[in-house]
Amino acid sequence: MSIRGGRTAPSLTAIQKAKISETKKQQFQSGEQVHPWVGRKHTEESIKKIRDNHSHCWIGKQHTQESKDKIGKASRGKRYPAMCNTYKLTSPEGTIYIVSTGLKYFCKEHDLLLPSIRKVAQGVRRHHKNWCAVKISTAKAQLRDA
């Protein structure tokens, strides 16, 4: 059952759909009914608007490798603290680190495996390479408190 115009109407059966399809095909072939876009073209004004619309300026184009590197370098390390969990990590030497943005980058920097550190923080594992981790706060709690 489908809803059309606020009331419930029965769905079409396969036979009804086939009949409608045949009728439409015959109408198009005989010329009784023409597809609404057949024979239409954009006006010069609409072509100019499409050309000037900058939302599609990168279709069919790609950034150069130099440009990709610049974009990556500019955005690297930028994190949104409101969207990240906060962790307290203790190194094997006893140094305590508070990581609130980019646990992934912290793990890379200290040669740690991100999934393993997360498991330590969740309490599934006791340590990873003698590092201990505790989740202090979650991103959802930070957004709720804000």
Image (spheres, grey):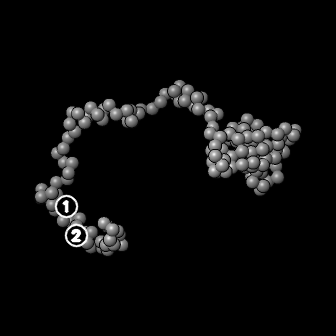
Q: Is residue 79 left or right of residue 121?
A: left
Q: Quadrant of residue 28?
A: bottom left
Residue type at mark 2: give it: Lys
Q: Quadrant of residue 52?
A: top left
Q: Which residue is mark 1?
A: 25
| Quadrant location, the N terminus | bottom left
Percent x, y of residue 142:
66, 47
Looking at the rendered structure, the secondary structure element under dot 1 is helix
Percent x, y of residue 141:
67, 51
Looking at the rendered structure, the secondary structure element under dot 2 is helix
Q: Is residue 121 left or right of residue 38?
A: right
The circle drawn on residue 34 is: none
Q: Quadrant of residue 3?
A: bottom left
Q: Is residue 116 something that shows in the picture?
A: no
Mark 2 crowdedness (10 Å alpha carbons): few <14, some 14-19, many ≥20: few
Q: What residue do we see at 15% from left, 57% from top?
A: 33
Q: Which residue is mark 2?
A: 19
Q: What residue do we see at 66% from left, 44% from top?
A: 84
Q: Is residue 70 something that shows in the picture?
A: yes
